[in-house]
Image (tube, rainbow, N blue to C red):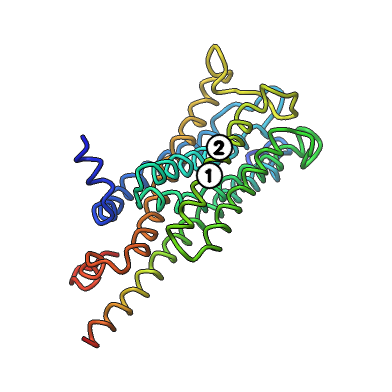
Amino acid sequence: MWKFFHQLASPPHFYRLAATLMPWLAVPALLLIAYGTYAGLFLASPDYQQGDAFRIIYVHVPSAYLSMMAYMFMAISGAIGLIWRLKLAHAVGAAAAPLGAAFTFLALVTGSIWGRPMWGTWWEWGDPRLTSELILLFLYFGYMALRSSIDDTAKADKACAVLALVGVVNVVVVHYSVEWWSSLHQGQTLMKKGGPGMDADMLYPLLAMILGFTFLFGALLARRIRTEVLYRERRTRWVREMILSPEGGR
Amino acid sequence: MDTLAMGNYGVYVWSCFALTLIVIVFSDWRARAHHNQVYRDMEVRIKALEDRQ
């Protein structure tokens, strides 16, 4: 078991493993997203209250879920990097941040577009879910700005790991805001007590989209981690040998 | 036409899906381009060092 983790944390091993994993993540992602998009747009019945506007959930919910998951990835890898001093863990955090920011941006914009016909407004500053999600976007920007402002990679890793861990509080607030406070945003649908409050023809495409987006995130993250590992290990012998080898290591 | 109209919510629904597609394609393209750039820079640097030796 320890040998497996030790090998997994080895940069050259992970660099090759990530290349192998990418197609295994990307192909299911494309298939699931293709099914989810088609079924969500054309097969699912319109919602009795929101009509066809509800179909925005098929991109909004997976984006919102990934916005939090990517942050948790950053925080957990930051904690692993701080506690066990694994360089690879910090590379994972650095690679996850731009993706998390992209999905948070998507969640905010698609939510805003949905809010216009449903709530009659693009944005509501007093709403805890909307505001905490916006703070999450700023946390991602802060994380990336902090990383690029410190030249010493080891110092940047430590500072960013601490920031990521502190920001977990906001992820908890984003998740529970609709339960703790009165919000324009609707409450939990998928994870509510008694099972999901949706019909099967609406639910299955949504689950396919969430799973598809998760695979997609995995594929994009694997590519970004490879770049991060390559850059961090640029002065090592294995990188030199790999680049000089006839087959390369792109 | 009904499918495009989405019960008069077409602009909202289609713009969300289009934006998602753009962000995903951009994220993938950016990740590939960045990786290729880092790899190329290192290839040039390492080969130059090898030639010097």
Q: Indicate the amino acid at tag 2.
A: Val
Q: Residue furthest top?
A: A194
Q: Quadrant of the N terminus of chain A?
A: top left
Measuring 56% from the left and 52% from the top, which residue is drawn there? A143
Q: Indicate the amino acid at tag 1.
A: Ala
Q: Residue furthest bottom?
A: B52
Is residue A141 rendered to the left or right of residue B37? right
Mark 2 Cα-neighbour bin, 10 Å: few <14, some 14–19, many ≥20: some
Measuring 70% from the left and 37% from the top, which residue is drawn there? A130
Residue A214, visible in the rendered structure:
yes
Badge 2 is on which residue? A168
Secondary structure beneath label 1 = helix
Secondary structure beneath label 2 = helix
Q: Quadrant of residue B41?
A: bottom left
Is residue A18 rendered to the left or right of residue A224? left
Query: Do the numbered discs 1 and 2 sit on residues whose CB atoms are within 8 Å?
Result: yes
Subunit that carries the residue with mark 1:
A
Q: In the image, residue A177 lies at what x, y percent?
A: 67, 28
Q: Quadrant of residue A11?
A: bottom left
Q: In the image, residue A184 lies at what x, y percent?
A: 75, 29
Q: In the image, residue A141 lies at what x, y percent?
A: 60, 53
Q: Quadrant of residue A30?
A: top left
Subunit that carries the residue with mark 2:
A
Considering depth in this image, is A166 or B48 the residue closer to the camera? Answer: A166
Q: Tell me the number on the disc at residue A132.
A: none
Q: Tell me the number on the disc at residue A164.
A: 1
